[in-house]
Image: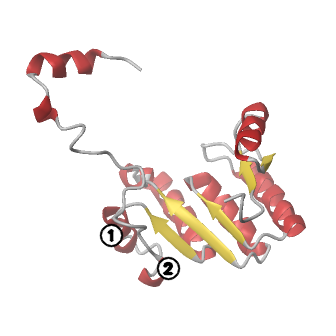
Amino acid sequence: MSKHFEVLGISSSDGDKLALVGIEEGVRVIPVEMTRKITPFKDLKAAYKLYTIFKREKPFIVHTHTPKAGTLGMLAAYLARVPHRLHTIAGLPLVETKGFKRFVLDFVENITYRCATKIYPNSFGLLDIILENRYTEDSKLKVIGNGSSNGIDLNYFNPELFNQKEIISFKKIRF
């Protein structure tokens, strides 16, 4: 992409690691601290920092991926009037959550989708869950290709290709 566009990478990862990615990919990078937890004050601070970056850089597109970066990035991009706000979804951990935490996560998911101009779930099953939960309208959703951008080659990982002894051995491997 950097051959055709000026790409700016923003991530909450360690500054040194992010700098290496920037060098390897040939793009400018900016670290913005974002936690994976629900941290309202830190989240507001990160959203404001993203907003100031977007106002300064004036991007044509902002594309987010994780739930936290999606919410903060889409909100900041919306407020900064970025014309194209794209969010990719590779999973919804909130569907297994209950109670008040689920209420909060549903609320935040709605904010993300309202602020995005296009939403890319990585599977048709995920698209169905999004519609069932009424997070957004169908017109904003598009599954890229046949879905499963993080997919697994079921032919390569077919358990029928291995005998019981090999399967037991694989299960003992720790990563």
The residue carrying mark 2 is 140
Quarter of the image that includes the N terminus:
bottom right
Quarter of the image that includes the C terminus:
top left
User: In the image, which disc is placed on residue 160?
Assistant: none
Name, please, the residue furthest toward the right: 56
Work out whether 16 lies above or below 118: above
Q: Position of residue 94 (x, y in %)?
A: 44, 53
Q: Of helix, strand and loop, which one carries label 1?
A: helix
What count of labels does the image hold? 2
Q: Position of residue 100 (x, y in %)?
A: 48, 55
Q: Residues within 10 Å of mark 1 (few under 14, many from 20)?
A: few
**At x 24% / y 37%, what residue is drawn?**
157
- For badge 2, the amino acid type reads Lys
The residue nearer to you, when weighing 160 against 90, is: 160
Q: Position of residue 139 (x, y in %)?
A: 46, 84
The residue nearer to you, when weighing 97 against 144, is: 144
**At x 60% / y 43%, what residue is drawn?**
36
Q: Is residue 94 left or right of residue 81?
A: left
Evaluate if marks 1 and 2 touch, with contact meaning CB atoms under 8 Å apart: no
Q: In which image quadrant can residue 162 be found?
A: top left
User: In the image, which disc is placed on residue 128?
Assistant: 1
Question: Upstream in the sequence, badge 1 or badge 2?
Answer: 1
- For badge 1, the amino acid type reads Asp
Q: Of helix, strand and loop, which one carries label 2?
A: helix
Work out whether 40 lies above or below 108: above
Q: In which image quadrant can residue 117 be found?
A: bottom right
Q: Is residue 81 left or right of residue 95?
A: right
Work out whether 166 lies above or below 114: above
